[in-house]
Image (tube, grey):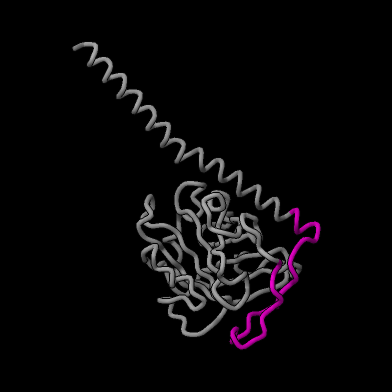
Amino acid sequence: MRLIVRTLSELCITVGTLIVLFVAYVLFWTGVRADGAMNDQIDQLHKQWSTGSVPAATTTTAPADPAAAPPPPPPAPYHYGKPFAIMYIPRLGFTWNKPVLEGTGRDVLAKGLAHYGGTARLGQVGNFAVAGHRRTYGDPLKDFPRLRPGDAVVLTDGTTWFTYRIDKGPYKTVPTDIGVIDPVPRKSGYSRPGRYLTLTTCDPEWGHSHRLIVWAHLDSTQPVESGEPDALRR
């Protein structure tokens, strides 16, 4: 009997240790690796941009009627798993900046924010839709519920600053509600084509049964040479 009790005790200790190690891995180590990966992606972009490997510059202001105005030149092709832009959200902190990569596979989401393939490209007419982890892998969108209408979401592709303004959200829905990333996203309040941005993340904080969504419109653009946009100077 003592042998059985001792064996069970040792098994419980072993299992408990494994659980602690797993939690530490999820909470700490994936974050360390993701932070390093995101920094590497940003460094990669800066190197590309410093050597002139950037898309053609786009317009300097967003037209009153984006759908009616001629679109700016299309950006360079996006390649799965490769970064093409950096996103800044002042509401989440003035040191908050994350790379945006093409595709939404797990390998991509482990290195930054992920652009939904098939949605509009940055600054183009349509819906530029981006996903990110709320927890684990660096917790890039941990504070997503803090976002409010009027908040700026700023991106750069190395030649142009794109400032989007949030119009609605955070809105809670289910993962099967793919209409939230339509060209004119359903339930967003938009009624005609435009230059939109959709951000998505998981809800609850440590689960994935639902999604939180915010929608934004392109408010303005300006060349990188003219300096940072006002949204990043406040």
Q: Is residue 37 above or below residue 4?
A: below
Question: Which residue in the rendered view is the most extreme toward the left?
Answer: 1
Residue at image location 52% in from the left, 47% down from the top: 138
Residue at image location 57% in from the left, 57% down from the top: 94
**Residue in front for this viewpoint, 99 or 224:** 99
Q: Is residue 80 above or below residue 170?
A: above
Q: In which quarter of the image is residue 90?
A: bottom right
Q: Quadrant of residue 203?
A: bottom left
Q: In this view, does 72 lie above or below 234?
A: below
**Residue in front for this viewpoint, 79 or 29:** 79
* Residue 61 part of the magenta segment: yes
**Residue 177's x, y, as percent?**
39, 68
Q: Main secondary structure of the magenta part?
A: loop
**Residue 216's x, y, as percent?**
51, 73
**Residue 116's x, y, as percent?**
54, 64
**Residue 130's x, y, as percent?**
53, 63
Residue at image location 66% in from the left, 53% down from the top: 42
In the image, taking residue 180 as reference, residue 129 lies left or right, namely right
In the image, taking residue 6 as reference, residue 231 lies left or right, namely right
Residue at image location 18% in from the left, 12% down from the top: 1
Q: Give the range drawn in magenta.
A: 47-76
In the image, taking residue 74 as reference, residue 219 lies left or right, namely left
Q: In this view, does 203 lie above or below 151?
A: above
**Residue in front for this viewpoint, 20 or 5:** 5
Question: Which residue in the rendered view is the most extreme toward the top?
Answer: 2
**What quarter of the picture does the C terminus occupy?**
bottom right
Q: How many labels sit on residues?
A: 0
